[in-house]
C-alpha cells in the first residue's frame, strides 16, 4: 500500500459517519507531463499548468539553517503564477471535506540553482470543518496562504470565496528517502525537509501534524484527529441531561435514574425499558424524551413522537418506502421517524411488532454508521442515487439524505410478561440499545400509601402499621405474575368512584369487600389471564383470607380466578 492508499484508508473512518468525501489531485506517475526548471525551481512553462498542476511544487531553501519552505517564488521574491494553487477537486455533490494534494519539492542549493529530488514527495490533506459548497468535476483551490490557513474556492458560486482550513495533515512518502547532498557537501535529509514544510504550514491557525504511513499508530492518530476536526463543524449534540427523579413516577427506584444518567453521560441515547406491565415504562420514556428534547422545538410542538407497535407494522411505517404519488407515479415517502428526525421517538409496546423487520434498516445508524435505503430518488432511473440515512447531524446533507437532529433519540418499551418475548429481538439489535428493567416497587405497602396521599384518598393517618388490603392483594398476585403500580392506581380510583367513603387503610367491611371484588375483576384479573390452575387456586385462597371474605364471596373470587386458567 502506498502513501496515498494508506492516507485514504485512514481517513475513511473519520469521513464515513458523516458521509463526507475525500478528493485528491496530482498525478501518481513519476514522469510528469510538464517539464520543470532547475533555474526557477518551478514549472518550465507556468502558463501550461493553469489550475490543474500535476503536482504542487513547494520550494525549500537549503541555503539557510534550518531549511525553510514557501510557495514558489521568482528571483525578485514574487510568487510564481499559480504557486498558491495546490490542485483541483471533483466536488459536484458538495460533500468534500478533505482535499488531498501530491507535493513535490524544489530545493534551492548554495549556488542559487534548484534540484528536484526524484523520490521525495508528500501528501498534504486540507481538512475543512464543513464540506466545501457544491461545485463541478474540476474546482480549483487557489491562493493558499499559510499565515492565515486560508484557500480560495469558487464552486458554483458567482464569486470565489475564501475558505478556512481547519487541519492540515502532512503525510510522508513510503518510498526511499535518501539524503540530498548539497554543493557545499552538506546534506539535507527528507525529515529536515518535512520539518521545513511543517513549520511553514504551522504559521497559521490551522492544526498541523505530520504522519508517517509506515507507522500504524500514526495512521490511527490521523483518523482520530480528522474525526475531531469534522465533529467541530457539526452542530453540537445537546449536552447530556441529568435526570432527577420525577415526582409523577412513584415507585421507580433510584438505581433506574442512575443507570439512565450513566448512559446519557457516555453519549448513549437509545433505550429499551422492559419489565412487567404497569410499571411506568411508557411514562418514564416520555419523561426521558422530554428532558432530551429540551426547549429547542417550535412553540406548541410535542417534544417527542409517540408510536404504539403493531403486528401489521413494517419498515415503511417507521422509516419509509415507495408509495403512489398519483396516476402512474411512485416515489419515496418518509416514515414516522424520518418525518420527525429532529426529536426523540418513543415506540411503545415494541414487542407487538416484528421488531427486527421494522427496525432492521436502522441497525447501522444506531451504531453510528450511514446506511443506504433500497429506494431510488428517481424510481424509473437505475442510475439514480438511493436515499440515505446519516447517523449524526450533518449541515451538508444532500436532498436525498436524512440526518437526525441533535436531540434525536429512540426510546422503546417492551412488556415482559414472560421471558420468551425477549427472543423476538436479535442480539444485533439488542446491543444497540441500553436495556433498563423497570420492576415492581420494592415496597408495595409504601407505594399504596403514597398513592393514596397523592390521589387525595387518605381517610386518616398515613401509618405503616395500619392494614393495607390493596397492597396485600397486589403482593399475592406478584408471587405468580409481576404487575406494576398502574393497575393499583386504577383500582384505587375506580373503587373510590364507586364509594368515596372507603378507607383503604382499614380492614374491608362487607360493602368494601363487594366493591373490591368487582374492581379487582376489572383491573387485575385481565392481566392474569393464562395463569395455571394451581396459581389461580393459590391466589384466590390467599386473597380471600387477606380480605376476610365470607364463604359466598370467597367462592365468587375462586370462580373468577378459575376462569383465567387454561
Image (tube, grey):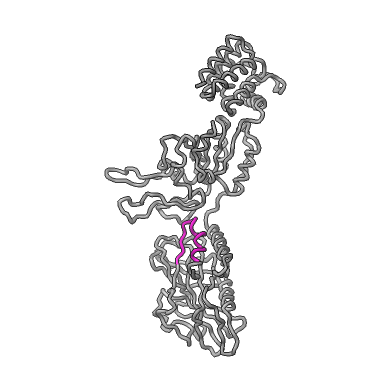
Q: Nearer the viewer, residue 168 or 424?
A: 424
Vertical order, 491 against 57 (above or below): above
Tell me where the magenta segment starts and ends, as one range.
7-23
Vertical order, 106 against 102 (above or below): below
Overall secondary structure of the magenta section: helix
Looking at the image, residue 515 sits to the left or right of residue 377; the answer is right
Q: Nearer the viewer, residue 470 or 162?
A: 470
**The magenta stretch spans residue 125:** no
**The magenta stretch spans residue 17:** yes
Q: Residue furthest front?
A: 534
Q: How many marks?
A: 0
Q: Residue furthest left?
A: 328
Q: Nearer the viewer, residue 95 or 482?
A: 482
Rendering coords of residue 208 (x, y %): 57, 68
Note whether residue 250 is visible: yes
Which residue is found at the position 42% from the left and 52% from the top?
Answer: 372
Note whether residue 501 is visible: no
Vertical order, 2 against 376 (above or below): below
Rendering coords of residue 265 (x, y %): 61, 47
Q: Quadrant of residue 147?
A: bottom right
Q: Nearer the viewer, residue 368 or 560?
A: 560
Which residue is found at the position 54% from the left and 72% from the top?
Answer: 172
Rendering coords of residue 361 (x, y %): 44, 46
Rendering coords of residue 301 (x, y %): 49, 40
Amino acid at each position: 500500500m502506498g502513501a496515498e492508499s494508506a492516507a485514504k484508508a485512514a481517513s475513511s473512518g473519520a469521513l464515513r459517519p458523516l458521509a463526507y468525501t475525500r478528493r485528491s489531485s496530482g498525478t501518481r506517475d513519476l514522469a510528469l507531463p510538464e517539464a520543470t526548471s532547475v533555474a526557477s525551481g518551478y514549472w518550465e512553462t507556468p502558463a501550461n499548468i493553469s489550475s490543474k498542476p500535476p503536482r504542487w511544487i513547494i520550494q525549500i531553501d537549503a541555503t539557510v539553517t534550518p531549511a525553510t519552505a514557501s510557495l514558489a517564488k521568482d528571483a525578485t521574491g514574487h510568487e510564481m503564477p499559480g504557486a498558491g494553487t495546490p490542485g483541483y477537486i471533483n466536488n459536484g455533490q458538495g460533500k468534500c471535506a478533505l482535499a488531498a494534494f501530491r507535493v513535490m519539492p524544489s530545493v534551492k542549493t548554495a549556488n542559487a540553482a534548484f534540484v528536484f529530488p526524484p523520490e521525495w514527495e508528500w501528501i498534504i490533506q486540507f481538512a475543512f470543518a464543513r464540506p466545501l459548497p457544491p461545485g463541478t468535476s474540476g474546482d480549483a483551490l487557489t491562493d493558499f496562504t499559510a499565515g492565515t490557513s486560508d484557500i480560495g474556492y469558487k464552486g458554483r458560486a458567482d464569486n470565489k470565496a475564501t475558505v478556512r482550513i481547519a487541519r492540515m495533515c502532512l503525510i510522508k512518502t513510503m518510498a526511499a528517502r535518501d539524503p540530498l547532498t548539497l554543493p557545499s557537501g552538506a546534506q539535507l535529509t527528507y525529515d529536515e525537509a518535512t520539518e521545513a514544510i511543517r513549520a511553514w504550514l504551522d504559521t497559521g491557525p490551522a492544526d498541523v501534524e505530520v504522519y508517517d504511513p509506515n507507522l500504524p499508530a500514526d495512521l490511527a492518530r490521523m483518523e482520530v484527529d480528522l474525526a475531531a476536526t469534522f465533529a467541530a463543524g457539526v452542530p453540537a449534540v445537546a449536552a447530556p441531561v441529568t435526570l432527577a427523579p420525577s415526582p409523577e413516577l412513584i415507585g421507580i427506584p433510584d438505581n433506574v435514574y442512575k443507570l439512565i444518567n450513566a448512559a446519557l453521560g457516555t453519549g448513549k441515547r437509545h433505550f429499551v425499558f422492559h419489565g412487567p406491565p404497569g410499571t411506568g415504562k411508557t411514562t418514564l420514556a416520555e419523561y426521558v424524551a422530554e428532558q432530551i428534547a429540551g426547549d429547542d422545538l417550535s412553540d406548541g410542538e410535542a417534544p417527542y413522537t409517540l408510536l404504539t407497535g403493531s403486528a401489521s407494522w413494517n419498515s415503511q411505517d417507521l422509516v419509509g418506502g415507495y408509495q403512489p404519488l398519483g396516476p402512474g407515479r411512485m416515489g419515496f415517502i418518509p416514515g414516522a421517524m424520518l418525518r420527525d428526525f429532529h426529536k426523540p421517538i418513543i415506540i411503545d409496546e415494541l414487542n407487538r411488532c416484528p421488531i427486527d423487520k421494522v427496525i432492521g434498516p436502522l441497525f447501522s445508524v444506531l451504531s453510528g454508521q450511514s446506511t443506504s435505503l433500497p429506494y431510488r430518488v428517481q424510481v424509473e432511473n437505475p442510475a439514480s442515487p438511493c436515499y440515505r440515512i446519516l447517523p449524526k447531524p450533518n449541515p451538508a446533507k444532500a436532498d436525498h439524505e436524512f440526518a437526525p437532529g441533535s436531540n434525536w433519540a429512540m426510546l422503546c418499551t417492551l412488556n415482559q410478561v414472560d421471558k420468551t418475548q425477549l427472543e423476538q429481538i436479535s442480539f444485533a439489535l439488542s446491543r444497540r440499545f441500553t436495556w433498563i428493567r423497570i420492576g415492581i416497587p420494592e415496597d408495595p405497602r409504601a407505594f399504596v400509601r403514597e398513592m393514596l396521599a397523592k390521589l387525595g384518598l387518605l381517610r386518616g393517618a398515613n401509618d405503616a402499621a395500619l392494614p393495607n388490603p390493596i397492597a396485600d392483594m397486589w403482593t399475592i398476585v406478584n408471587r405468580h405474575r409481576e404487575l406494576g403500580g398502574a393497575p393499583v392506581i386504577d383500582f384505587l380510583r375506580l373503587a373510590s368512584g364507586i364509594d368515596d367513603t372507603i378507607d383503604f387503610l382499614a380492614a374491608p367491611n362487607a360493602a368494601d369487600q363487594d366493591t373490591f371484588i368487582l374492581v379487582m375483576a376489572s383491573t387485575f384479573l385481565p392481566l392474569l389471564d393464562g395463569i395455571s390452575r394451581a396459581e389461580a387456586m393459590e391466589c384466590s385462597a390467599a386473597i380471600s383470607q387477606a380480605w376476610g371474605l365470607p364463604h359466598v364471596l370467597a367462592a365468587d373470587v375462586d370462580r373468577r380466578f378459575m376462569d383465567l386458567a387454561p
